[in-house]
Image: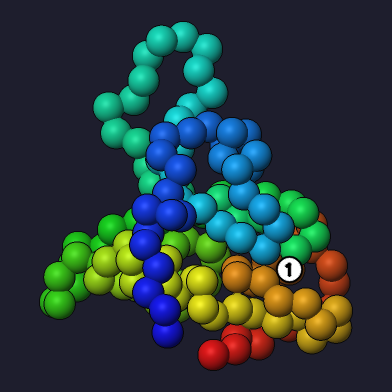
Amino acid sequence: MEESDPELYFIGASTQVEAERLVKEGDFRLYYKLPQIEKCDLPVELQLYIVYRSSFGRAFHYPVVTISDQPEGKRYRVLYGDPRSQSFFSIQQLVNHHRTFSYRCNQNEFFETFPVWKNSLVPDGCETDSIH
């Protein structure tokens, strides 16, 4: 498996709208989520997110969280709705995993990095089949 530079997948601090403009269908990028700025106050901390544009063109925003209570040390996880989703020791491992593994929608025979069809806005009749 080719290791990718996580910096290639990082767009910096951005609003959701700006992040959506920077991602193509079937791809994802990491970004620190800025609020829609109506005044000059910025939060002290910014949450890391993944913006993912599905194969049908809709953008999804998922938080990347740090899990500190693991015996092996700090780990990173994308919260996309699966309570059993994998966690990783580094952002690079997280990026490499989501670049490599996909889910297949059986009915429509398309692949997605995240199982977005479980959302009611996604085509019906799709099941989760992770491929490796």
Quarter occupied by residue 55: bottom right
Dot 1 falls on a residue whose secondary structure is helix
**Residue occupying the point 70% across, 82% down:** 104
Residue 30 located left or right of residue 58: left
Q: Position of residue 122 (x, y in %)?
A: 79, 63
Q: Which residue is mark 1?
A: 117
Rendered position, 39 above or below 53? above
| Quarter of the figure that contains the N terminus | bottom left
> Does residue 77 appear in the picture of this structure?
no
Residue 56 located left or right of residue 64: right
Residue 118 located left or right of residue 28: right
**Residue occupying the point 84% across, 67% down:** 123
> Does residue 65 appear in the picture of this structure?
yes
| Residue closest to the eye, 8 or 26 | 8
| Residue closest to the eye, 127 or 102 | 102
**Residue occupying the point 66% across, 87% down:** 129
The colour scheme applied to this rendered structure is: rainbow
Identify the residue at the far bottom of this view: 132
In the image, what residue type sits under mark 1? Trp
Q: Position of residue 101 (x, y in %)?
A: 54, 80
| Quarter of the figure that contains the C terminus | bottom right
| Residue closest to the eye, 13 or 65 | 13
